[in-house]
Amino acid sequence: MTLELSFAFTSFILVLSLFWLLKVCRRSKPHNIVQKSPPGPRKLPLIGNLHNLIGSLPHHALRKLAGKYGPLMHLQLGEISAIGVSSPRVTREVLKTNDLALRRDHNCLQVDQILGNVINDHRENQKSATTGNGELSREDFVDVLIGLQQSGSLGFPITNNHIKAVILDMFSAGTDTSSSTIDWAMSEMMRQPRVLEKAQAEIRRAFKGKKQIHEKDIQNFSYLKFVIKETLRRMCPGVTFGLANIELPLAQLLYHFDWELTGRMRPEDLDMTEFFGAVVRRVNNFPISEKKMVNYFIPFSRSDQGLDFSSRAPTMR
């Protein structure tokens, strides 16, 4: 037993020594430029500053560290060296004043290439239609931006970087908006079980026996559209954009699963309101759990054509 413990301890020391030698060799390589890191908490071997973020609220730990070390601090997250920025002034310096010098990492170059391909594809489509070799489909937002760039009607030049920035903003803004809208819709239907049953009945009647739902199959769901519009009427993330982006995922959730509240949460206690903190959070979590779909179908009455939008009360019927 003593021999085994001695062997384990010796192996541990050897591994640490090897790691230390690798770090020393890496640091001993000549560098043309000596980079000085911003202030930050003391690092531990192997894990760096990961111990400073332990807990259920790591963003609160980051806020405390920023209060101690300033708005620009250095964190070593294992093998990854990270810089934390936490003030509007420094953020403006990083993202606006010196954005060209600081943003050219590998991921940014990949995103830039993807967005460039999107613009080039639209230009090729327009060129093919102009020469008679192809047919220009219905214009989308990128086509409109390219048209404004070519016409110069705005009074200031529009570059490809401007078009890329607009496309990226639309993708970034739409992601959280769509997921938040789905949370609101599911929350409202859990508060009104009759609405949930009717929406599931409409979807399951249409897709009985199918394993997957595709976007082309969800054009005729009148009641589901009413549910989405009522949700958008209440929390307004952008009606047209939200309707186009949440119909398919919401139909998938209702078709494949039955839903129930977990714990002691009652339907009337659900609250999707947000309050301000270190990050924006819900007043309470959304304690919903899914069950595998049960093969039964609730009859759908023709008299139930949708929701009453004339009422000002924030409830579904």
Image: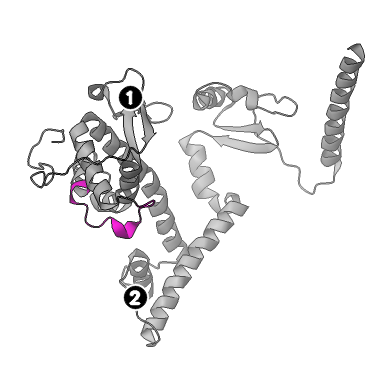
> Which element carries disc 1, helix, strand or loop?
loop
What residue is shown at x 38% (from left), y 43% (from top)? 176
Position of 34 compared to 154: left or right? right
The furthest residue to the right: 3
- Which image quadrant is residue 137 in? bottom left
Q: In terms of secondary structure, where does tag 2 sit?
A: helix
Camera-side residue: 155 or 297? 297
Circle number at residue 283: 1
- Residue placed under numbered mark 2 in the picture: 151
The CA distance from mark 1 to mark 2 is 49 Å
Residue drawn at x 34%, y 42% is: 253
Q: Quadrant of residue 258?
A: top left
Q: In this view, does 157 lie to the left or right of 265?
A: right
The one nearer the camera, 228 or 112, is 228
Say which quadrant the N terminus sits in.
top right
Vertical arrangement, residue 273 with respect to residue 207, above or below:
above
Q: Quadrant of residue 49?
A: top right
Tell me which residue sits at (50%, 40%) in the image.
91
The location of residue 23, given as percent across then percent down, is 82, 36
Please tell me how crowded label 2 is: few (under 14), some (14-19), or many (20+) other residues with Cα within 10 Å: few
Q: What stretch is highlighted in magenta?
A: 210-224
User: Is residue 149 placed above or below 179 in the rendered structure?
Assistant: below
Our reading of the magenta stretch's main secondary structure is loop
